[in-house]
Amino acid sequence: MDSDLLAGPSRILALTQGDPAGIGPEIIVKAFLEDAAATRHAFVVGQVEVLRRAAAVVEAASGGMPLPVIRIETPAEVMDLPPRCLPVLDPAGPGPGPGAWPVLPPWGQVGAQAGRQAAQAVVWAARAALSGQVAAVVTAPLHKESLHAAGVEFPGHTELLQAEAARHAACAVQEMPVRMMLASPELRTVLVSIHVSLRQAIEAVTFENVLETLRITHAALARMLGRAPRIAVAGLNPHAGEGGLFGREEIDVIAPAVRAATALGMAVQGPIAPDTVFMRARSGPGLAGEFDVVVAMYHDQGLIPVKYLGVEHGVNVTLGLPMVRTSPDHGTAFDVAGTGRASASSLLQALRMARQLVA
């Protein structure tokens, strides 16, 4: 018998549908059509009709073979399904009922219904992973404005998953610190702060937050790499403050956190000028990076370099959770939703990374 089939939940991946008005359902369909190995023993948490609409769009755009979308009721059912089908588990329950959605959200529009569907799928998948029903969660893009319209109190996946993990562990959210890592074949970055304003991000550059980020980064990368990671820390200010001429955060906050991390046995260097540190960490054919990961002080500082190198290759990994979660490195792309033109490359990378992390 196939050893994978004996592995049970340790091989099953839950893939959330994302915002039904965005490209998430389409790229899920394309992923199942393009890579049977990456999508093997994976299923979608979402609405069957949303995925069937997406499958019809992809078929019409490509002229290819249709992909059957089938309803399942438990994750374990995917272990016995034949290839070339798309299993969907509706978190509202089997068949029409009180939780069923009356209409499909229109393509490319912010809406409360779309936000509720997206959040519902994430919560169900997170609870399945935390309870051991699935090995990992891979999330398709959601839209933060739709979440807000739906009354969801969290601005994005990371915060929603953090809250679910804290609930499962019966602890306060503050006791479940998490960080966002963006990873591509050439560069990894981890962020001190995530979805806050730039003003709030600067205020979040504290000794405690920087050191905690270094702790989380070291622990996660050590598991991934099988050795202590080489960590670079970006400065906050131009030229890393230029000895205090352009700001004192490097002197008063970041450097002390680096020294504290070094004293704990971590291989950390910094603060390094943010306009050069990412180039120094970049690796690839014929290019050996000096560092395994860069800790960036805020969202755009860390994400722009990774996305510039190729958004189709980037993967978002949430560090610090008691579960594996990855996602593609792009958003809902409302401007092309419903056309069948969106690429599944980053989603496939996220699926492959999730498999690596649970192997």
Image: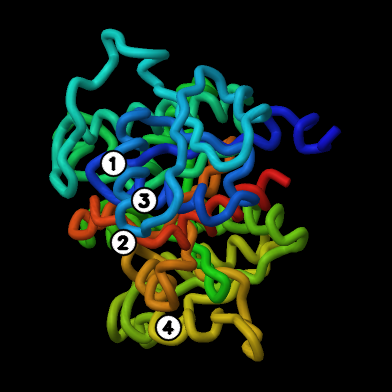
Q: Position of residue 279 (x, y in %)?
A: 49, 85
Q: Position of residue 11 (x, y in %)?
A: 68, 37
Mark carried by residue 59: 3
Q: Which residue is mark 1?
A: 19
Q: Which residue is mark 4?
A: 273
Label 1 sits on a secondary structure element that is: loop
Which class describes the residues within 10 Å of circle 2: few (<14), some (14-19), or many (20+)? some
Q: Does label 3 or label 4 sit earlier along the sequence?
A: 3
Is 228 positioned to the left or the right of 353 in the image? right
The span from disc 1 to disc 3 (Cα, nearest Å) is 20 Å
Nearest to viewer (mark 1 / mark 3): 3
Q: Which residue is mark 2?
A: 341
Q: Is residue 134 visible?
A: yes
Say what amino acid the circle numbered 2 marks: Arg
Which class describes the residues within 10 Å of circle 4: few (<14), some (14-19), or many (20+)? some
Q: Does label 1 or label 3 sit earlier along the sequence?
A: 1
Q: Residue at x 63, y 82 (%)?
A: 290
In the image, 282 versus 202, the foreground residue is 282
Q: Residue at x 39, y 85 (%)?
A: 275
